[in-house]
């Protein structure tokens, strides 16, 4: 069956509920899915943040200190570390007044990937290219 | 016949979408389709055994057992369940336990995926 492309679209703000975080963790799980698939089969997700989903992914979070839980920033960095394509909607960042340079990177962890701040048209393209689209 | 995977995230109580997911799974299974049902988030707590069916609240146990008997694969996110105090020792028999990659693997082989988000 080969590769199956997925688009995971996070539309809800982080911390207010569990769903948005589950979007990230389900995307990260692609790194181990091959143990359940036949040889040559792969799953390639793209993790996209749109709408209120762009809230709560900025760098400098202290969730462990304040809430005793891992931060969304850490999850986003882990996503980059496992070579996920992470797309953040440029228009929605602007709508909420979040500067693009507030997005975290995972250079300190050795990640090659970086968050891609893109126009919504690019996220639409990821949706169009995916076999299945999952909204979180 | 097709292969359908349903990802179910809302909780058993307080949302009718959970009931919808189970009824859809049943309808698809009755038509002969292969159905996979993934529980994550609040839905993962619904696999606890010995649910008391009070008339004011939805119950999942009876329906889940019936689905499993029909051959529907039901799997709960182990981390999500454990966080809610549910594990293999107190869960409905026949429910599978795995990590989130189970869902992605089932999606890989599915003709259709219905992802029912929570909250």
Image (tube, coloured by chain):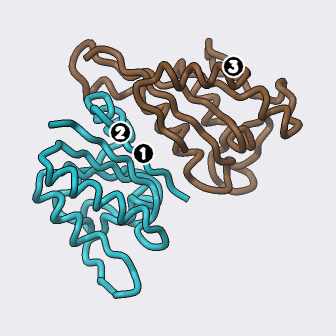
- B47 vs B7: above or below: below
Mark 3 belongs to which subunit? A
Q: Which is more foreground, mark 3 or mark 2?
A: 2
Please say if the residues under marks 1 and 3 sit with CB atoms less than 8 Å apart: no
Mark number displayed over residue A116: 3
Secondary structure found at label 3:
strand
Q: Which is more foreground, mark 1 or mark 3?
A: 1
Secondary structure found at label 2:
strand
Note the chain letter of the cyan one: B
Please say if the residues under marks 2 and 1 sit with CB atoms less than 8 Å apart: yes
Mark 1 belongs to which subunit? B
- A11 vs B80: above or below: above
Q: How far apart are labels 1 and 3 at the CA level?
A: 25 Å
Q: How far apart are labels 2 and 1 at the CA level?
A: 6 Å
Q: How far apart are labels 3 and 2 at the CA level?
A: 27 Å
Mark 3: few, some, or many residues within 10 Å (few <14, many ≥20)?
Answer: some
Residue marked by disc 1: B115
The residue depicted at 67 percent of the width and 17 percent of the height is A114
Percent of width and height locating residue B103: 34, 39
Quarter occupied by the C terminus of chain A: top right
In the rendered image, which quarter is residue A21 located in?
top right
The residue depicted at 40 percent of the width and 66 percent of the height is B85
Left or right: A41 in relation to B29: right
- B11 vs B76: above or below: below
Left or right: B102 in relation to A51: left
Residue marked by disc 2: B113
Front-most of A117 and A101? A117
> Chain A takes which shade in the image?
brown
């Amino acid at each position: 069956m080969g590769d199956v492309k997925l688009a995971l679209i996070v539309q809800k703000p982080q911390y207010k509920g569990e769903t948005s975080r589950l979007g990230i963790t389900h995307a990260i799980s692609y790194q181990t899915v091959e143990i359940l698939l036949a040889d040559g089969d792969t799953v390639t997700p793209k993790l996209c943040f749109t709408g209120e989903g762009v809230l709560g992914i900025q760098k400098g979070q202290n969730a462990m200190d304040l809430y005793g839980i891992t931060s969304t920033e850490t999850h986003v960095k882990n996503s980059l570390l496992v070579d996920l394509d992470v797309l953040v909607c440029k228009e929605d960042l602007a709508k909420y007044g979040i500067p693009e340079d507030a997005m975290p990177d995972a250079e300190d962890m050795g990640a090659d990937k970086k968050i891609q701040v893109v126009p919504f048209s690019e996220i639409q393209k990821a949706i169009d290219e995916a076999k299945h689209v999952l909204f979180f | 016949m097709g292969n359908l995977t349903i990802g179910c995230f809302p909780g058993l109580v307080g949302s009718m979408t959970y009931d919808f997911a189970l009824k859809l799974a049943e309808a698809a299974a009755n038509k002969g389709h292969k159905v996979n049902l993934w529980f994550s988030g609040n839905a993962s707590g619904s696999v606890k055994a010995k649910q008391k069916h009070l008339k004011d609240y939805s119950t999942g146990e009876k329906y889940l057992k019936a689905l499993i008997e029909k051959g529907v694969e039901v799997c709960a996110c182990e981390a999500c369940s454990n966080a809610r105090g549910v594990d293999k020792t107190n869960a409905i028999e026949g429910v599978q336990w795995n990590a989130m990659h189970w869902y992605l693997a089932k999606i890989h082989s599915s003709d259709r995926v219905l992802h029912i988000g929570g909250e």
